[in-house]
Image: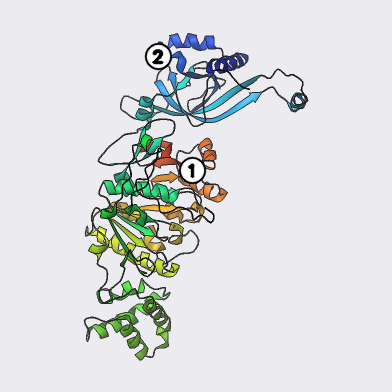
Amino acid sequence: MNYDSEDDYANSVSDNAHDMGDTLEHSEAHEEEIGNKFDKTGVVGIIYGDVGTSELKCSVTAPLEKGEYVQIPHETAGLVLGQVDKMERKTNLSDEKALLLSQGEMMDIKEKVLAQISIIGYRDERGLLQTPKVPFNAGSPVMHAEDVLIKEVIGITQNEKTGAYIGMLMGHDIQIQLDINDMVQKHVSVLAKTGGGKSYITGVLVEELLKHDVTVMIIDPHGEYNSLRDPGSDTEFNAPFGVTPRGYADQIVEFSPDTKINKDATPLRFTLSNLEARDILSLTNVKNIRQALPALKKVLEMIRANKPTFSLKDVIRTLEAQEDSANAPLLQELVYLDEIQIFAERGTKLEELVQKGKMTILNLRGTSPDISELIVNRIMTSLFEMRKINAIPPMLVVVDEAVNYCPQQGSTACSKIMRTIAAEGRKFGLGMVIITQRAAKIDKNVLSQCGTQIILKITNPLDLKAVTSSVEGLTAGTTEEIQQLPLGIAIVCGAGLQVPLFLRVRPRESRHGGESIKIIE
C-alpha cells in the first residue's frame, strides 16, 4: 500500500491501532500523565496487548525499521531504551481475496504494521544498567531514540587515549570505539563467511592499534597485510567517517621464511646454537617426545663440547653415527627441517621480531601448512614466555585463518600454545585476535575466551550456531540478521559495550590487500 506522505501513513496505521483497542486518544491522555516528556512528532508507535518488562509489542504509526533504537516513557524509570527486534505487516487479504484482486476486482485491504521491541534498559542513579521491574503501560508512545540516550544507556564513549574507532552506529552519527585495553586483556574474534570482509575490518582495527603505538604481530598466511604500508584511495565515502588516506610503512616490519616469494620481507631464521633440545623438538612433529628428547640432548652436548656453532647437518651426522634404530623418526624430522632451511648461523633475534609500537608481519605465503604450524608454535611459545618475564612489551597477536592453527577436531603443532595463550595470555598482557570463516571448526576453548566479537555475514548453519552459543546478548532477531548483513555492516559485542551493536565499518585509511582477483575486467 503506497502513501503520499508520512502523515497519511501515520493516519492509516492509527486507524488500525484503534481496531486493536489501542487509540491515540489513550496515548495522548498518557502523555499528559507523564508530564509531556515527549514530542508528538517523534512518536513511531503505540504499545498494545500484553506488556512485559523485557519485551513488548507496538502498533507502528510512522516509518520504522528493524534494528532501530526507540525510547519509551516508563512511570518509574523515566525514558527506557529499546530496540526493534522484529516487524511484520498484518492484513485482511486472504488467498481467495488475493486471487480476486489479481482478476481486477476491487478490494478494501486493511493492514497494520506491528513491531516487537526488546528492552535494553536505563541507567539508575548509580549509573548501572537496569531493566524496569514494573511492566510498561499499554497505550504508551514509542519514539525514535535520541543519540544522548543511546550513548548513555549502551555505554558508548569516545576516549582518544584507549579507543579504537572502527565505525559508526547504524542509523546514527555516533562513533563506535573499542577499548584497546579490554581487547588485549580479553582477546578478540572476527567471524564471517568467505568474502564477508574479515581482512578489511581487521585492517581497520590494526590501523587504530598502530595510531595508539600498540605492539602488534600478524600471522599472515596469504601475504595480504603488507598493503597497510600504502595509503588507500580518497573517495566520497570517506568524508562522513572523517577518514583520510594514510600509509603505515614507518611502523611495519615484515619477516618470512620464504623470501623468494615474499621479496620485500626479511628472512625469518632460527639459530641452532641458542636452542635447547626441547625447542628443536617443538619445530618437529615427533610423536614420542620422551624417547627423542634424551637422544637429542646427548647429541647436542657432544657437538657443543667441540663446536660453539653448528648446523643441523652436524646433528644429523652425529645421530646417524650412533646407528640406533630408535632414532629413525627423529632423524626423519631433522632431515625435513634441514631441507626447508629455517636454520642459519645467525637467527632472527626476538628484539628484531618484536619492536615496541610497531607491527610485525609474519608472512607465511608460500610456506607449507606443516612448517607454518611449527613456526607459529615456536614464535607464539617465545612470545608467551617472554611476556611472562616482561622481556617484550604488552602486545596483540593477530592470527588470520586461525582454524589452521587451533582446529576443534584433531590438533596441530601449535594447538596447545594457542589454547594456553587464550586462557592465560590476558594475565601477562598478551592478547589475540582470532580471525576465521569457520566458527564451528575452531577450537571452542580458544573461541570462548574471546571477550570481544566482531561478526559479519554468516550463513552456514553450523557456524551460526557456534557464534550464537559463544556470544552473550544476541536476540533471536539479531541472529536472523547475521545471515543477511550487507557488506560493510558488522555486529560488535564486548570491548566495553553493554549490548551488541550494528555498525557501519569505517573506510580503510591504508590500501586493502585482500581484494578478490577479477578474471574479467
**Foreground label between 2 and 1:** 1
- Residue closer to the observer: 382 or 270: 270
Q: Is residue 223 above or below residue 179?
A: below
Q: Residue at x 42, y 51 (%)?
A: 199
- Which SS class for mark 2? loop
Amino acid at pointer 1: Leu
What residue is pinned by disc 2?
A: 37
| Left or right of 18, for residue 274 | left
C-alpha gap between disc 2 and disc 1: 39 Å
State whether residue 63 appears in this view: yes
The residue positioned 31% from the left and 51% from the top of the image is 426
Mark 2 or mark 1: name the one nearer the start of the chain: 2
> What is the quadrant of the N terminus in the image?
top right
Disc marking residue 487: 1
Q: Nearer the viewer, residue 247 or 205?
A: 247
Residue 428 appears in view: no
Relative placement, left or right, of 335 versus 13 is left
